[in-house]
Amino acid sequence: MQFKIARDALLKPMQLVSGVVERRSTLPVLSNLLLDIQGNRLSLTSSNQELELSAEVDVSDVQAEGRITASARKLFDICRSLPEDSEILFSVSSAQLRVSSGRSNFSLATLPAEDFPKAENEIDTVALTLTQEQLSELLASTSFAMAQKDFRPYLNGMLIEVDSGSLRAVATDGHRLALHTVQVENNVKEKQRLILPRRSAIELARLLQDPEELVTITGGASHIRAQMSSCTLVSKLVNSRYADYERVIPRDGSKSLVGNREALRQACQRAAILFSEKYQIASFNLGSGEFKVVARNPDQEVSEESVSVDYDGDPIEIGFNVSYLIDVFTAITTDKVRMELTDANSAVLLEPVENYGASFVVSPSRL
């Protein structure tokens, strides 16, 4: 292997794929990047066995093709430290990757490309295309509701549900639920359900940098692939059955209010000032034309704040984890939000008044 490439052309794709590299892995090769030069295309690939990221870049000066792996961290740090507009020469000799630019020369240890894990090829049962903006909004409005270390594997991920003409993302940690649906053309004839791991959902959101560019999503029984012009993400799926989330969405709330989303978010944020990580339960008092947020902590400190809302029903007091409501009010992008509930023991349904396919459910907490 021997080729020369501009430092600035290499840095961005290398940065894109380095996000999943394991710093401390039981398999040393997972700390490496796979460099594969074929023709005039250089492919950079990283993997943690669950998730694979790859990016390609054109190379004009190729002396010899080949494949090798070397430390992702060291390669990125070397390239980043070199001067802008510099050129870098890569070559392999005696199982060492030599990196040279100007008067700088490095010799890095390598591992064989054959040791690097590759995503399995399987038949795709799902195929659809949407813009990065659509997918980014889908992920941003739901990913916060994923669990982190729940004993139920499916909660530590995001449900990707593909039906004829639509794509839906669903996330829940058992206390709150977020779903967002967009209309897209696809190839499915019956509903397909894929569970994307939490890490993969977060990485995918990070890669979406060009709102107008298209993303092609394909998937099968055990994998999902998101392909963009800049890079490709391939992820294993969570091997589990997702719960019937539809049955927890309240659709017959007898009480309904409409308020300014930003005013409600700020009121909740100010209430959260008094709370610790362990205790974040606030009292929400709903009365005629008013939504009052009352926060009390174990030190007997109290804050009260009222927000004007459109509501003329019976008074009600209900407790919520204030951070859950902050997340929802942050995820909603419209000016007005509608909240529907039945009583102090029932979950609340929150939706943007100018509905764009997003719905949120938050369960009450004991005061």
Image (cartoon, rainbow, N blue to C red):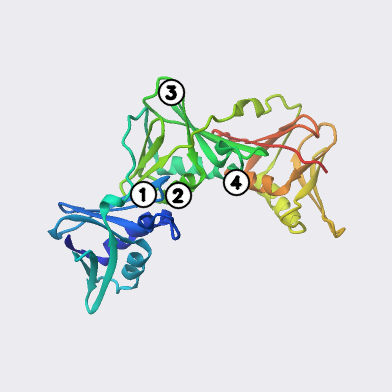
Q: Which residue is mark 4?
A: 149
Q: Are marks 1 and 4 in contact (CB under 8 Å)?
A: no
Q: Are marks 2 and 1 in contact (CB under 8 Å)?
A: yes
- Quadrant where the N terminus lies? bottom left
Q: Which residue is mark 1?
A: 53
**Residue 171: in sight, yes or no?**
no
Q: Position of residue 187 (x, y in %)?
A: 36, 25
Q: Is residue 318 left or right of residue 20?
A: right
In front of the other: 40 or 358? 40
User: Which mark is first along the chain, 3 or 1?
Assistant: 1
Q: Nearer the viewer, mark 3 or mark 4?
A: 4
Residue at 55%, 36% in the rendered image: 154
Q: Are marks 1 and 3 in contact (CB under 8 Å)?
A: no
Q: Which residue is mark 3?
A: 164
Q: Quadrant of residue 212?
A: top left
Position of 276 relative to 167 (above/below): below
Position of 315 relative to 34 (above/below): above
Q: Which residue is mark 2?
A: 203
Q: Residues under labels 2 and 1: Cα distance?
A: 9 Å
